[in-house]
Image (tube, rainbow, N blue to C red):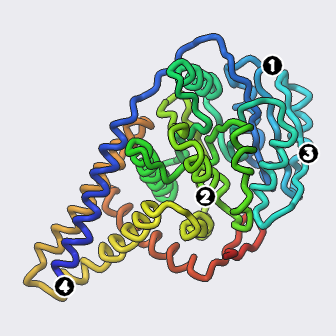
Amino acid sequence: MIIFLLIIYGLYFICMMALIIGFRRIPLFNMKKDSPLTHFSIVIPFRNESENLPSLLKSISNLNYPSNQFEVLLVNDDSVDGYEEIIKSAIEKSTVSIHLLQNRRLSNSPKKDAITEAIKHSKFDWIITTDADCELPQYWLQTFDSFIQKKNQETNEPIMICGPVIYKSNYSFIQNFQQMDGLSLQAVTLGSFGLKNPILCNGANLAYRKDAFKTVNGFAGNDHIASGDDIFLMEKFKKIFPTKVKYLKSRDAIVSTKPQASWAKLINQRVRWASKTGKQKSHLSIFLGLLVLMVNILFLLLPFAVILDIRNAFFYVGLILFKMFLDLLVIKQTAKLFRRKISFINFPKLAFTYATVVIAVSFKSLNGKYSWKGRNFKNQK
């Protein structure tokens, strides 16, 4: 048993160290205030988001970018709230070109259908996606443009750029948990990019060339899976354009997103995310997912091992502390990028909660069913 624990935690240590090294390999990008050259089509699918649309639209109106060099395509996915008046008012007041489209359902994935519909109506070369429950930083588009210009000058023009995302927090435990969880996901994302084998990205802050989207035939081949509009597309781009998928490590590009209001909604959201894991083509992603699950199962069992095997109690306690130290090391590095502080006092409680959530999500996702935004989904093979 002890040898098994040493092997599992040894593998976990190697993976965490690799992610830390990968994270540090990506230099922090500082935006240059050059004359903007890139034209963007901002694509935002939404369903029953009247509560969040005003904040999103306000952040769009505050973007520091020439209004004739970007457009906003809002795609309604069968909403039944008061979204029309909110968007109509925004269109009347805005100097930005805002268009309201209606989703055309063609597959098992409403969001992929919505993005595909928006791209059909888009008029610019770069598509940049976000979510309706997000707020955009003032220099968002300018930072992406500056990054594209720099890469073009280096003759390494990107076709996909993945940006940073942070959960907002009011310092309640559930929101602090989601922010920490989000930081851990960003750590994996950044680390894997730094190791030149990206396995994660986030559709809340994602840009790609429209011609590249058409080259890989969009979401064809994975549109039977409800989620994964970001990761599956990234995997397609990696296969055809292996050196042109980049991460924009910049504080000026950080998109903030709204956390879930309850544990039930949080679990359901994570089940939706987990539903695509088994369909990913990255062996590293699957291996890391299984390793994290195994480590967290053992992490919750170790306190019982302390009681049942008192002779090796110090060893088990050491593993508990070792795992928390590794996680803290990884998350603290990412938190520094996002200018967030990690509470050392609350971290043990967050660590055990995280392990519980990981296990709950894993087992709940086994039946392949989940609900999201008033709809029921079942994983397709």
| Residue underneath mark 2 | 260
Q: Position of residue 26 (x, y in %)?
A: 39, 35
Q: Residue at x 16, y 79 (%)?
A: 2
Amino acid at circle 1? Asn
**Res. 163 visible in picture:** no
- For the C terminus, which image quadrant? bottom right
| Residue underneath mark 4 | 307
The 10 Å Cα crowd at callout 2, few under 14, some 14 to 19, many 20 or more, is: some
| Residue underneath mark 1 | 68
Which is nearer the N-term, disc 4 or disc 1? 1
Q: Position of residue 102 (x, y in %)?
A: 90, 50
Q: Position of residue 125 (x, y in %)?
A: 75, 30
Q: In this view of the protein, which residue sits in the foreground, 100 or 59? A: 100
Which disc number belongs to residue 84? Answer: 3
Under circle 2, the secondary element is: loop
Which disc number belongs to residue 47? Answer: none
Q: In this view of the protein, which residue sits in the foreground, 180 or 330? A: 330
Residue 75 in the image: above or below residue 369: above
Task: Using residue 132 as the reference point, say whether residue 355 is left or right of it.
Answer: left
